[in-house]
Image: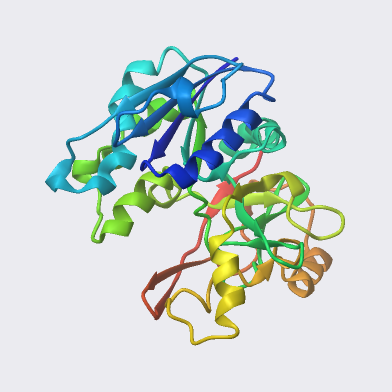
Amino acid sequence: MKICIHISFYFNDERIKYLNKTINEINKYPHDTDIFIHTNKEIIAEEIFDKNKKGKLNIIVHTKFKNNNAAYLTWKCRSLLEKQIEDYDIFIYLEDDILLYKETLDYWLKYKDLFIKHKCNVGFMRVERGSDGELYWVDGCIKMNNFAKIGNKLYLVNDVQPYCAFWIYDKNEMKLWMNKEYWDPAKTCCHQPHHILEKSSSGKIFDQGYPTVIPITQSATPHLNCIVYHQGEKYRRHVETSRLTTPSWPRAPWFSTIKFKEAINKKILQDTTKTMCFKNCHQSQILCPFFYFQREHNHQRVFQKSLFFHQD
């Protein structure tokens, strides 16, 4: 099995340490892995980055961007990905401060085929560690309370915010994606500068229309290996600081306040489990209303959507 990882790196001396942590974690992967770092400044890899013991480490410098907007650096890897499609089995995109643990890669490999079969995305949760030592869900604003049944098992549906600043797909899924209009940045909707960044980093989770699901542990927490770690802890640190000062950032009340181990509404999970029927059926459905949350500054709009997926 061969992996390629593309990373967007807006050059910043203070963030080199994040990339080196990522490279050192990649060195734990049991697979050949090539790394491609896309940046906006000429750099010499051997001088600032640790060695990739699993494969190549290539630096690709970009200086020209659509509308002179450097936010499009996050899209620059796509033309190269098209050329690489037959060379690798797994394709990964990371923002420069995202740490993808070996255990998280193993988790994705374990569940991807099952979830693809049932038209679901493998779910991940971006986390940071707070000053209290607890892991906090960076992108969560409320607890998750929707669930889906696949076979005879109940899974958590992350319809609160499945975004986690990275994506991972196998070769077949990449080929399907490359044939969609939303693969092309010229044909996708990006209204604001931060939309350009996040649209690229979200993969196809918002365009594909599939629910994002996460296995549930016996202790009623999300699967422990679904986490991707956000280095720097800036979101959690901002929340902790804003408790003592007037919040200066509109997102502060919404993000990084929910502990990872408490991200599931356990009362609704308990009630759903009690009423759940495990008989064989032709269809399996999401067992609670399915919501997407879309936020623009301080405004919150809720869209309800019914989704169904097949069960053999």
Q: Nearer the viewer, residue 286 or 199?
A: 199
Q: Would residue 201 be seen by someone viewing this image from the given angle?
A: yes
User: Residue 56 at what x, y percent from top left?
Assistant: 49, 15
Most extreme residue toward the front is 47
User: Residue 16 at what x, y percent from top left?
Assistant: 49, 39
Location of the C terminus (image quadrant): top right
**Corner quadrant of residue 23:** top right
User: Residue 210 at what x, y percent from top left?
Assistant: 49, 49
Residue at the image point whose x is 32% and y is 58% from the top: 194
Q: Nearer the viewer, residue 149 or 62?
A: 62
The image shows residue 168, relative to residue 249, as above or below, that is above
Residue at the image point whose x is 64% and y is 67% from the top: 144
Residue at the image point whose x is 38% and y is 52% from the top: 198
Rendering colour mode: rainbow
The image shows residue 303, relative to residue 219, as above or below, that is below
User: Residue 124 at what x, y percent from top left?
Assistant: 61, 48
Most extreme residue toward the right is 218
Q: Nearer the viewer, residue 12 or 34?
A: 12
Q: Nearer the viewer, residue 269 or 64?
A: 64
Most extreme residue toward the left is 67
Count of numbered tags: 0
Q: Would residue 183 be seen by someone viewing this image from the given angle?
A: no
Residue at the image point whose x is 46% and y is 73% from the top: 251
Location of the N terminus (image quadrant): top right
